[in-house]
């Protein structure tokens, strides 16, 4: 059976501050998701949380970007926002950037990851859900899952994976995408996805038949709103087993922490910590950034799960290393590289400070330096 998996998330109010979600808000969102199943719009739905964000995992037969499915999620988040406002929760409705629904939620604030496929004999998927970080947080683990044989033995051992995978990479500033095939174009791929402030992996496909393997949310709230309104807190769907990386290979990148942008006020670098559902409550300096892994078996379109895949002592070392990295980075305080560079701060209060002090900057006759991205210093052909 050909089904669509849609994961739509939003931050509609934090309890307390930005640390968690309130049970009454989650219950209201679940109410709408369950109603969608009862009315036959959805085959099934599951509501999960990470930090102050809520995601609705939905299965249906309507295809990607379906107006009815997206409106259900929008209505659920609007209703949840009303509960958040009554409870005076912090940032109530902050991800709902539009006044009314229009077609689908893309460009309206909520993050979206969707994929459509023919359900296999056994269809395991993993939904990763992160808080206090940006869509580029998935670049490194997706590379390791689908292109690094040191992480994914199946790329070498499994004949069904031996042809590799192609990555669809998006320039978040221009909205343009490029598809790059691995292993043939691996180095070209890394040129882009290593530049995490601009390029994000949008989807991954199996080379031998073009089958969808992974889909990620790519929405950047600051670019939509023109100001800082919270970090993007992305979601990612990954299919596993039988021609795709095994569940253990999909999870393996998270066994060693790496640094992502986000954390406090969306303006700092921090380690991405893999945690169980119950530990997905970032509090220290509103962090460090967290990620959960919700495992599902799909059976006739029904979601069997979620299984809390990071609730495993094998990830304790990664969590401990994250704590050590967090200590080291916090020692930098407001100084880079803990604080993001100026080009990543343009949607915070930094422009207001510069505007206030612009008349106090004086020319001392030194040669003018070119700003990053101005074109100076580019590699000659």
Image (tube, grey):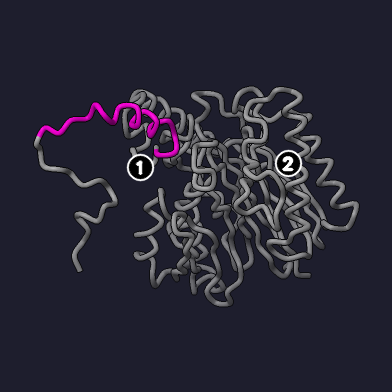
The boundaries of the magenta stretch are: 346-364
Question: What is the crowding at mark 2: few (fewer than 14 residues within 10 Å), some, or many (at least 20)?
Answer: many
How many numbered callouts?
2
Alpha carbons under labels 1 and 2: distance apart? 31 Å
- Residue 28 colored in magenta in the image: no
Could you tell me which residue is drawn at 90 percent across and 54 percent down? 39
- Which of the 4 image quadrants contains residue 293? top right
Residue 354 in the figure: left or right of residue 216: left
Could you tell me which residue is drawn at 57 percent across and 61 percent down? 245
Which quarter shows the C terminus? bottom left
Q: Mark 1 points at which residue?
A: 343
**Which residue lies most toward the left here?**
365
Q: Nearer the viewer, residue 321 or 348?
A: 348
Q: Mark 2 points at which residue?
A: 77
- State whether residue 378 is above or below residue 92: below
**First in residue order: circle 1 vs circle 2:** 2
- Which of the 4 image quadrants contains residue 331? top left
Could you tell me which residue is drawn at 56 percent across and 49 percent down? 251
Where is residue 51 shown, x and y percent of the image? 62, 33
């Amino acid at each position: 059976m050909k089904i669509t998996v849609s994961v739509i998330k939003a931050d509609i109010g934090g309890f307390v501050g930005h640390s968690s979600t309130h049970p009454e808000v989650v219950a209201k969102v679940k109410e709408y998701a369950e109603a969608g199943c009862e009315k036959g719009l959805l085959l099934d739905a599951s509501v999960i949380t990470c930090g102050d964000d809520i995601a609705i995992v939905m299965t249906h037969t309507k295809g990607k970007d379906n107006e009815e499915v997206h409106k259900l999620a929008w209505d659920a988040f609007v209703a949840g926002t009303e509960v958040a406002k009554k409870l005076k929760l912090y940032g109530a409705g902050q991800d709902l950037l539009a006044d009314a629904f229009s077609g689908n939620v893309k460009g309206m604030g909520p993050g979206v990851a969707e994929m459509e496929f023919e359900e296999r004999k056994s269809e395991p998927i993993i939904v990763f859900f992160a808080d206090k970080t940006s869509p580029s947080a998935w670049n490194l683990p997706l590379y390791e899952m689908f292109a690094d044989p040191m992480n994914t033995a199946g790329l070498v051992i499994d004949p069904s994976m031996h042809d590799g995978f192609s990555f669809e990479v998006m320039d978040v500033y221009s909205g343009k995408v490029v598809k790059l095939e691995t292993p043939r174009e691996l180095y070209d791929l890394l040129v882009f996805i290593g530049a995490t402030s601009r390029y994000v992996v949008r989807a991954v496909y199996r080379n031998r038949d073009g089958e969808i393997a992974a889909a990620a949310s790519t929405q950047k709230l600051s670019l939509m709103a023109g100001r800082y309104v919270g970090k993007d807190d992305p979601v990612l769907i990954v299919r596993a087993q039988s021609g795709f990386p095994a569940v253990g290979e999909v999870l393996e990148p998270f066994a060693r922490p790496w640094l992502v942008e986000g954390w406090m006020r969306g303006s700092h670098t921090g380690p991405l910590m893999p945690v169980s559902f119950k530990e997905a409550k970032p509090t220290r300096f509103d962090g460090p950034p967290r990620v959960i892994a919700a495992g599902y078996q799909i059976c006739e379109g029904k979601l069997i799960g979620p299984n809390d895949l990071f609730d495993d002592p094998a990830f304790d070392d990664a969590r401990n290393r994250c704590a050590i990295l967090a200590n080291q980075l916090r020692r930098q305080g407001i100084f880079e590289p803990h604080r993001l560079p100026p080009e990543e701060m343009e949607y915070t209060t930094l422009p207001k400070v510069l505007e206030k002090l612009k008349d106090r900057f004086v020319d001392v006759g030194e040669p003018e330096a070119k700003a990053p991205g101005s074109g100076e210093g580019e590699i000659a052909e």
